[in-house]
Amino acid sequence: MTPVGSHRPFFSSSTLVPLVSVVLLLVVGIVVADDYGMSWDEERNYLVGADALQAYTSPGQYLDYLDAGDPLAHHGPSYFMLWAVTSKVWEEVVPWWTRADARHFTNFLMYGVSVVGVYALSVRLVERRYAWMTAVLFATQPLLFGHAFINQKDTPFMAFFVLSVVVGLAVVDRLGRSLIEGEQAGGSWRGLSEAWRRVRGVRKWLGVVTLGMMVLVVVDVLFTERLLWGLRWLAVRGAGGDVGQVGQMVVDLDEDAVRTAVEHAVLGVTWAYWAGRGLIVVGAVAIGALVLWWMIPAEMGRWWRRHGREIGWVVL
């Protein structure tokens, strides 16, 4: 048995049997996807996903989406959005399938992700022939196999959970090994700190101020949302409203209130803020990285060449 945490490559000539097994699993899924009926909450979850797609593309659908009630309160919409899109695609590709059959096949694809994840975890612990046998045993469990089609909540949850563990272990392996090699090669973190101490004058102060502002933006977007309140204030002023209306509109925003120009403006900036929240954080981090590159270009270049690929794994 191979020790835990070993770094046996995932793909090699011996992966042919597991890959063939996955292909066979997909073929079985295509054949039997139309043999299942709908679960009691399937249609409601599908509509939540479709409404969420409309909410992200049009602020006019925002309030309708929030009226989804119980399905939205207990389950995030991200998979339901993917589910709504892919089911329409499969329905076009396989014309004898109904929309429900197409949805069931999307669920089954998520189950396939779980099977691959189980294989990736097993191959860290045992030889390949035992790893693919473990994956096949997992894939053919009757209870799991049946739910793979009709359970649009637990099946994708299981898939993304297993995938998160696989990627997390890969991050630990790669980043840990990279940092050790970097320290042995002269100290990547030590090199950055020494280069930072060598920066002097206006360049350092401009860099510190900019980095501090980017940190404040990230903290605000993730925790305090003062930026959102500032955008609402600007929206109210731009629409000719009273600034004191901001708090009232946030507390009491209904379909009748949205008809006024001021409340339309507030709804618009609120929708844009939440739709672009992740982009704001990514942009702030990117600006911070560029500032560091401007201040200590040589050392940042060396650090990126050593750890850039591992940072990609962290993002994934």
Image (cartoon, helix red, strand yellow):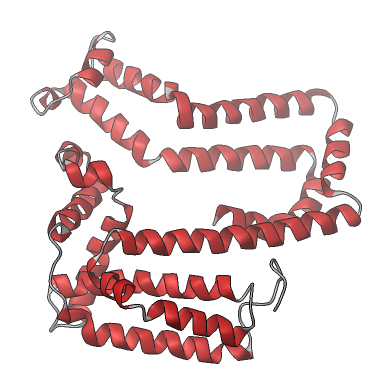
Quarter the C terminus occupies:
bottom right
Q: Quadrant of the N terminus?
A: bottom right
Residue 89 in view here: no
- Can residue 113 be seen here? The reply is yes
* Image location of residue 190, percent across then percent down: 87, 42
Task: Note whether 315 is above or below 133 in the view shown.
Answer: above
Q: Is residue 220 above or below residue 47?
A: above
Q: Give me the residue at 67% from left, 24% from top.
A: 209
Q: Nearer the viewer, residue 180 or 294?
A: 180
Closest to the observer: 208 or 182?
182
Q: How many marks on residues?
A: 0
Query: Residue 306 at what x, y percent from top left?
Result: 77, 58
Tell me where residue 184 appears, x and y as whole percent: 90, 56
- For residue 140, side relative to residue 72 (left or right): right
Name the side, left or right, on which 139 lies relative to 195. Answer: left
The structure residue drawn at horizontal position 43% and vertical position 84%, both measured from the top left corner, is: 22
Picture coordinates of residue 93, whole percent (x, y): 22, 81
Q: Quadrant of residue 247?
A: top left
Task: Using the rendered view, name the quadrant where residue 199 is placed.
Answer: top right
Q: Quadrant of residue 284?
A: top right
The residue at 27%/17% (across/down) is: 236
